[in-house]
Image: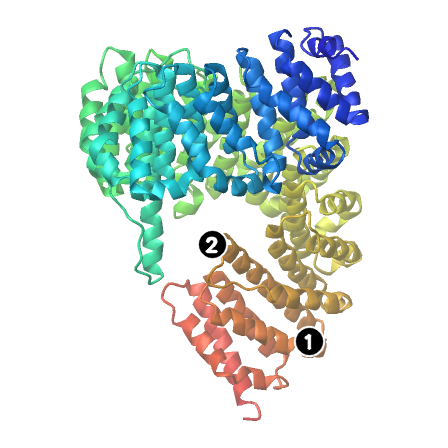
Amino acid sequence: MNVAEVLANTLSPDATIRDNAEKQLSAAAETHFQDYLHMLSAEMAKEDSQQPIRAAAGLALKNAVSVRDRTRLAELQDKWLNKVDPTVQAQVKENALKTLQSENVRAGTSAAQFIAALATIELPRNQWPELMPALVRNVGEGSDALKQSSLTTIGYIAESEDPELRESLAQHSNAILTAVVQGARKEEPNEDVRYSAMVALGDSLEFVRTNFENDGERNYIMQVICEATQSTDSRIQAAAFGCLNRIMSLYYDKMKFYMEKALFGLTIVGMGRPEDEVAKLAIEFWCTVCEEEISIEEENQQIQLEGMTELRPFFNFAGIATREVVPVLLELLTHQDEDAADDEYNTARAAYQCLSLYALCVGGMLISDVLQFVEANIRSEDWRKRDAAVSAFGAIMEGPEFVLLEPLVKQALPVLVGMMDDQVLMVKDSAAYTLGKICEQCGLAIDAQLHLPSLIQALFSGLKDSPRMASSCCWALMNLADRFGYDNQDGDEVPLSKYFKDSVSALLQTTERQDADNQLRTASYEVLSSFVTNVGNDELGSIAQLYTVILERLEKTIELRSQVVSADDRNALEEMQTSLAVVLTSITHRLDKEVKPQADRMMHILLQILSSLPPNSSVPDAIFGAVGALANALEDEFAKYMEAFVPYLYNALSNQEEQQLCAMAIGLTSDIARSLGELVAPFCDNFMNYLLNNLQSNTLSQQFKPAILQCFGDIAQAIAGHFETYLEVVMGVLQQAAGISVNSDTNYEMIEYVISLREGIMDAYGGIIIAMKSGGKPNVLAPYVQSIFGFLSVVNADPNKTEGLMRAAMGVLGDLAEAFPNGEVAQYFRADWITTMVREVRSNRDYSSRTIETARWARELVKRQQQHNA
């Protein structure tokens, strides 16, 4: 194989030539791995070879030993370690290090990537001990090209996310720091070298924690970085501000001295730089400050709640700098680019993000500066200033106390509604987005009589505007629906009701706009679903009419499946089917039993869609949601659809690779069991097998286990005494799960998981006890009573418990007492901790009336048990 020719062909614009070349390389890698690596490394190191070919050789080398897939990566690493002769390994490494000397920058960069991939394999195994010293020596003694490539290599190695490599790098921290700081100094004459050093320093900061603890070393590092912010090269400036961001995130507690002496001034000046990249990274420094200080305050509050006194240091950098930083951010909001793409992150958007974080961090402290800016610019003839004023007002809607924002919102609403008719699209879009923020964060300030009519009218007019504007209006309307929705009002009629028919019409029209993209269509259907959920009962007739429309649209999508010719077509169709199914679910929940006349048609359409979907489709999640809503509405009348539907449910329960679908199927199994009652019995053998397999799976996330245990309880209650068939196995599973505990070293995520697991166990016990009692078989529970009380005791003794868990515990106690009314297990109820537990739940003022009533009920039953044979 002529390797140069094949590599050149991988860069061909002709897809056929390119594919053939890539196949040749893949075949060589599979069949002659050792020779393949040696040949590529020689081509990469060849100085007279063309630059693109050398770069392609480096990329092919990296891909030969490094991939994202963990299983495949282990195979490649094993091939390098065990299938390549040590002599060849040495030659390949030598060629890679030799390539770093090349004046050809692209070749040096590709060699750096390959070396970093090899380092991931070898350094954790204490191999290639000469690598890091060689790279450090290159930086100190090499040519400019060698310095630059070696620093780039250090950066690539340091930014690796491989945990074993990161651990092994700790022993090289001094060498890494020596190299990168030497290259980053202002005395370094070559700006390319200095830039590469600054990037490598940013990537290395996590590994030099020991050095950062030393005052002298830390001072020197900070001096080098601060001097780099003053470089005439904007790349070096940007990299320096990037380093400062990382340092603030990693070493906040060491930053008080540097903020006072330098960083405060340097970053404010940096935010005003004309170079976009420099300004953005200087702005992001203050984003990092705010994020750190928000996090520290939350942590310290939690520490105090837990009765501990050792708080994290908090220096209030953001608060102290408010009057200097906020005016700069406000001015930067006027630097909009009207041609920027929706997802383009520029200076103005960075400033908006920072202002929003500032509001969260310092609350009302920034209101006066922002108001002054808004009042000065809201009616400016310059659209950029108008837009900045609107955006600034929206940015502070989360953070300051509601009592401070309420009068401002009431005053601003008419102005903002008027700006929905601005001549400039960006201003209109910002007005719509700001109205969305107000509806989301300060909805209580909106008066149904005073503000709602003009606000709704403006937002629905905005739906007819550009897709970008319409999407912002959709978000605002969703928040408005939540504010004036059914759950937040008294009576059947809610403020939303009078606008419902017109809203439905406008939203349906928006989904059919010729220029509507998938995002706008999806947003419109989300709003429609939200309006259905939130409108009053007086509009149930309108919802029923909408039901027919949505069914017709969903039915039409089935025919569209045959017209799909591309991935984009498929995505568009599946998003539409998902959106329609979500709306259908909301309608079904609201209409409840009134869906019965259309149920056959609805289920027929849903089954047709399920039968036509390709593998790995995202649509079944939404279809299952609609099926679950229908099962809840029809209850035992849903049984007639089970034979046709259950194969899809079995398939989803067994699909551990698509975890979200599997989780949806577990929840749907619970819904169906509760709806069908004893009619679910013929399907329970399969349900239980799939659920038990999922419980023991190493593929499925453990987060789904609580739902599986809860599902056992739902199935038990549905089939009553018939659950005895599964009792021994399930009780064994529950006892095993109950043994999982937490200690003082357990992290927060694990504590949350254990609590949710215990809630699942408690729900399962409750369902099984009720099932055996109602099925006339309480005595079969006798062998398990001791372990149930043991579990209750563990839950009671653990300080980490939720109201939901304790309410379920009261339920289990009461159900057990009712299952054995003649005192057969009375001795367990006489334990002192039982009385104490019930009393603590019953007297907890933070608990809801529902929980307290459950505890009172349990107390009476416990008393009766304690009186047996006393």
In percent of the image, x 51 and y 32: which residue is there? 133
- Secondary structure, mark 2, is helix
For label 2, the residue is 748
| Amino acid at circle 1 | Leu
The answer to whether residue 457 is seen in the rendering is no
Per the model, the C-alpha gap separating discs 1 and 2 is 35 Å
- Secondary structure, mark 1, is helix
In the rendering, at what x and y percent does residue 389 appear? 26, 22
Residue found farthest to the right: 31
Which is more foreground, mark 1 or mark 2?
2
In percent of the image, x 62 and y 75: which residue is there? 787
In front here: 190 or 287? 190
Residue 643 vs 109, above or below: the answer is below
User: In terms of image quadrants, where is residue 227?
Assistant: top left
Residue found farthest to the front: 141
Locate residue 479 relative to residue 542 in the image: left or right: left
In the rendering, at what x and y percent does residue 35 appear? 76, 23
In front here: 647 or 674? 647
In percent of the image, x 47 and y 60: which residue is there? 745
Q: Quadrant of the N terminus?
A: top right
